[in-house]
Image (cartoon, grey):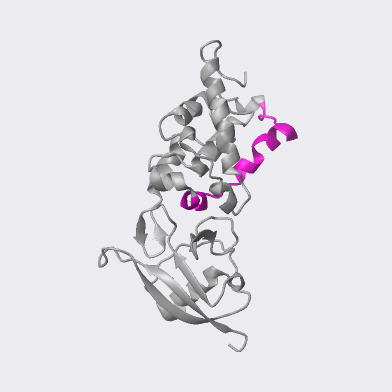
Amino acid sequence: MSDRQKKTFVITRFDPDKDEVPKTQTYEIPVRPDWKVLDALNFIKDEVDGTLSHRWSCRMAVCGSCGMMVNGEPKLTCKTALSDYGDTVEVGPLSNFPVIRDLVVELEGFMEKFKAVKPWILRAKEKAPEEGVYRQSPAELEAFKQFSMCINCMLCYAACPVVGNEPDYLGPAAIALGHRYNLDSRDEGDAERNQVFREEGGVYSCSYANECSEVCPKNVDPAAAINQAKFLAVVDWAKSFVSPRSRKK
């Protein structure tokens, strides 16, 4: 324990069976210089207070499970070094989400938005196996690759001011993932997605605050995806009056 120093953690607690509103609880624990915020939360859970609830899984910034507010900013706690903070660290649940318990938020609303944009390859007719694979050039892959790096951590939703004020807004991650498939040369579902994008709560609700791109731990640029989707949704709408879909044909 000689290589450890004391830090104070102010953690949001909420028990739906007892509490009407969230409260905070303070813990002072010894931490190692190389610890991430998640290490401290796990120490508190294992050694100090087993009632603390929080999500985590891979500890490698891959699964997206451990997103929380750290000193007021959306962060992946497995990637966020304690050494970047002073003697006191505040940890709370992601903003703009209903809280289930303590640091755990409800994601069902996002999953419905996620499904609405159909983030999978849509085709009018699938190839038979004997017809071979759908080939794609490096340039075609590059067109959508960065938007495919999303890990659904929801940091962008916690940062987005529109999500906080407009509950029906599809949000950055859902739009970016839908746009990723619109850009995929193998996909034929852009007309369906663009219809969803044009609806109320779609891409035109975005005010381009750019906070979503600032907080993304995988360097995805949802703000760029939304702006591109705005343009392509209008193009698709205009083309529907003069030519059959799709723009990829």
| Magenta stretch encompasses residue 147 | yes
The residue sitting at the right extreme is 138
Question: In the rendered image of this protein, does residue 201 appear above or below residue 49?
Answer: above
Residue at 25%, 65% (x, y): give it: 17
Residue at 48%, 31% (x, y): give it: 197
Residue at 44%, 35% (x, y): give it: 116
Question: In the rendered image of this protein, does residue 25 appear above or below residue 193?
Answer: below
Locate residue 75 relative to residue 131 in the image: left or right.
Answer: left
Query: Residue 188 at what x, y percent from top left?
Result: 56, 25
Residue 63 found in image quarter:
bottom right
| Magenta stretch encompasses residue 54 | no
Question: In the rendered image of this protein, does residue 79 appear above or below residue 210?
Answer: below
Residue 78 found in image quarter:
bottom right
Residue extent of the magenta highlight? 132-159
Query: Residue 242 at what x, y percent from top left?
Result: 55, 10
Query: Residue 46 at what x, y percent from top left?
Result: 45, 77
Is most of the magenta stretch helix, strand or loop?
A: helix
- The quarter of the rendered structure image containing the C terminus is top right
Total count of labels: 0
Residue 50 in sight in this render: no
Query: Residue 215 at what x, y percent from top left?
Result: 57, 53
Locate residue 98 relative to residue 224 in the image: left or right.
Answer: left
The residue sitting at the top extreme is 242
Residue 160 in sight in this render: yes
Residue at 60%, 25% (x, y): give it: 128
- The quarter of the rendered structure image containing the N terminus is bottom right
